[in-house]
Image (cartoon, coloured by chain):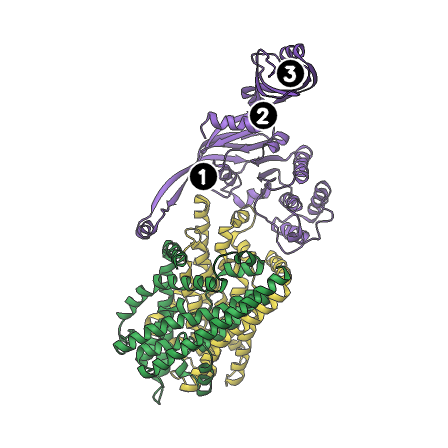
Amino acid sequence: MRPYLSVWKLRFILGMQYRSAAIAGIATQLFFGMIFLMIFQAFYSGSAAEPPMPLDRLVSYVWLQQIFLSLIMLWFRDNEIFQLITSGNVAYELCRPCGLYSFWYAKLLGQRLSSATLRCFPILLIVFFLPKPFRLSPPASPEAFVLFLAALALGLLVVVGVSMFIYISVFWTLSPVGSTLMISVAGEFFAGMIIPVPLMPHWLQTVAGFLPFRWTADFPFRVYSGDIPAGEALWGIAAQLVWIAALTAAGAWTLRRALRRIVVQGG
Amino acid sequence: MVLYFKYLSILFKSQLQYRASFWLLTFGQFFIPFSVFAGMYLMFERFGELRGWTFYEAALVFAVIHLAFSLSECFARGFDMFSGLIASGGFDRLLVRPRSTALQVLGSQFEFTRFGRLLQSAIVLVWALAKLPIDWNAPRAVTLALMVACGVLIFTGIYMLFATLCFWTVQGLEIGNIFTDGGREMAQYPLDIYKKWVTVFFTFVIPFGCVNYLPLLYVLGRAHGHPAGYMAMPLAGVLFLLPCLAVWLIGVRHYRSTGS
Amino acid sequence: MISLQGISKSFKVARRAAGLRQAAKSLIFREHTVVEALKDITFSIGEGEIVGYIGPNGAGKSTSIKVMSGILVPDRGSCTIKGYTPWKERTAYVGHIGVVFGQRSQLWWDVPVIDSFQLLKDIYRIPPDEYRRNLALLTETLDLGGLLETPVRQLSLGQRMRCEIAASLLHGPSVLFLDEPTIGLDAVSKLAVRDFIRTINREKGVTVILTTHDMSDIEALADRILLIGKGTLLYDGTLQQLRGRFGTERTVTVDYRGGSGQGPLVVEGAESVSWSPERAVFRVDTGKTRIADVLSRLSEQAELLDVAIEAKPVEELIVELYREHRI
């Protein structure tokens, strides 16, 4: 645990030095959140039928996306790992005393956490005090908030599990562009980052339900606003746990195979 | 201008050296705005219309801004990637050559893989145009072409502004994304659906509204008033680029008095 | 032809402290220190000279090169090169100079060298005739024949450096700035590059200003040395003068037979550096003792088989110069 902690601390210090980068990031996310909300509100205002998701829940949905962006987005890439793989230097990594899968997993987790801690609180503070149609409402209930925190944390583990596959795929494709692009475009869409999952047509919601992506963002954010009630949320958390187990098991297995290939081919 | 095309050809040759990755990226670029467009389509499918705008009208708005964006990413990439040129010291090299710095920076990079994105926007454009009952005449066609061209100028101007910032700091340039990526996201829907401050900012400060929303009213036959006014609107892009160029020159002067 | 008068330049540098607390502090408040990169630099260089510009890292070498090539504007002072003030009429001026940054390439990485050359031809607006003439000359003297069609990334470092130099000379400049042109090169390429620099200097009268850390470059090329340290010009003169100032000491190495065989040979006026039954090394200050005297005294004690007399290497002279100025 100690080495991971110091990796995290180092990242944090590094992140602090880029203060203007952080401020710029915050401003960007606020702006994007505003734009998305205005677009959705415009659509809602002309709607005759009752939309499947009330506006205030949608507002929470969009803001939470922006606040926790670095926890949930898939195109968060670590070029160091890509370079290790494409250059074949990954063989040296095998000399480390800890398992490669868990090491990379911890590294990616640390990066996301440190980047999120730097950015989420200022945005959170601002969006709680925005004028009415844009203001982020407090969580639906104390239970909902606790469940949301659990769901968000587990969702983070799901994201890292999925992104590990992006890195592992580079062992075969030898170029990070294709796989990152494809997985992140599809992942972003099915996580409800473009339009919220409840606003999708029914058949697409079914598709999203079978994929891991909506468990990373869509699910925790709807738990927060009470769009998914507590009882259902518990089942959702169970589903997240299953996904985490499946993703890490499959990821570790494919990474072992990929490494064996390298060892056999001699890099 | 001749020199610019020489730059184009040498960089095109370079990128073709990595054929597989070139095609893969081009292909991938095709899909990035695709999911955004799909989102737009699905929203219209659920809600029917957007403050009186139909899906095909919105698609036309989308296509124009994405065309402009992908063209500028392709041709003004040098300014977009300028921080790299500063960090590597490559800018010193440009200063010991007897040509204008802006031209050399423009020529330092082209991203031809953006043709994937361009193609996707072009398809949307054609589709939207085919479905819309536009009363075509020469002024309208010219206006449409001007919209795309001047949109490119605006994006280029923004890249230039943020490239200039690199002379002072290498951090915080992410803020430029608000105006490029953010501007694109924003301008892909008709401007009148937003709050007043957004509309005002993106009409009078960064004139996306002038190359997209306003002249489009004329193209779609929704405009009231004299068409010439609407046709001339996109030229705001030129007006925007000029001060950007001036700021760039100030930045170069600053660089030469302080080094990196 | 080149003359610098009282050139000064200082930079502001942000100070960054270590540790979490300091990092947090610097979020709000940032300290700056002013570094004087150049302090009142004055010198002039005549047409057709080769000048070695030396000094330890961070002494201000690159800053002065940047000022002279028009990249940087100095705070104070004046500089005239070929009648131009470099930072004022930049585009007109830079057509007369060539610059080689040893550590950075100006060639386009993925395309054959000749494509880069053709682009440079357009950038510098070189007339076709002149371009053809210069290219032919450079191809011949730098032996580029087989390289022009090869993509740059496939060239070795030595081949690439030859192409870099050619690229800087395509427009026929009369002043050439070389910033560490031999860095990282193997012995053969180094010799080829030096040879070429001498050739264009002799045949086309190109004035050459080169910075380097490799003293053998200086020894092989430079008639004149400018030593800069902590932003001030510390020495301006020929290599001979420098030798005369510090270099009265010689190292005398003798292979011998015979002698007492019991312990070192002892010679008056020569300090023993090392000794073995077959070979002895002495340090002799020629200002005080004549080499001939030392040798004749040695031959009285043993049968001399071989004698080698060496002056102090330039490296050591430079180190002594540094020491003298405490840099």
| Chain letter, yellow in picture | B
Question: What colour denotes chain C?
Answer: purple
Instruction: Return the disc, 2 or 1, that comes first in the chain's sequence.
Output: 1
Circle nearer the N terminus (1, 3): 1
Q: Secondary structure at mark 3?
A: loop
Image location (x, y in percent) of residue A125 = 28, 66
Can residue C285 be seen here?
yes
Q: Residues within 10 Å of mark 3 (few under 14, many from 20)?
A: few
User: Measured from the top left, where is residue B209 in percent x and y?
Assistant: 42, 71
| Colour chosen for chain A | green
Kindly identify which residue carries mark 3. C261
Residue pictured at 49% horizontal, 60% vertical: B80
Quadrant placement of the C terminus of chain A: bottom right
Q: Is residue C198 left or right of residue C225?
A: right
Q: Which residue is mark 1?
A: C74
* Chain for disc number 2: C
**Which quarter of the picture shows residue C164?**
top right
The CA span between labels 2 and 1 is: 29 Å
Mark 2 and mark 3 on one chain: yes
Q: CA gap, disc 1 to disc 3?
A: 66 Å
Do the residues under discs 2 and 3 have CB atoms within 8 angstroms?
no
Q: Which residue sits furthest bottom? A: A49
Which-is-in-front pick, marks 2 and 1? 2
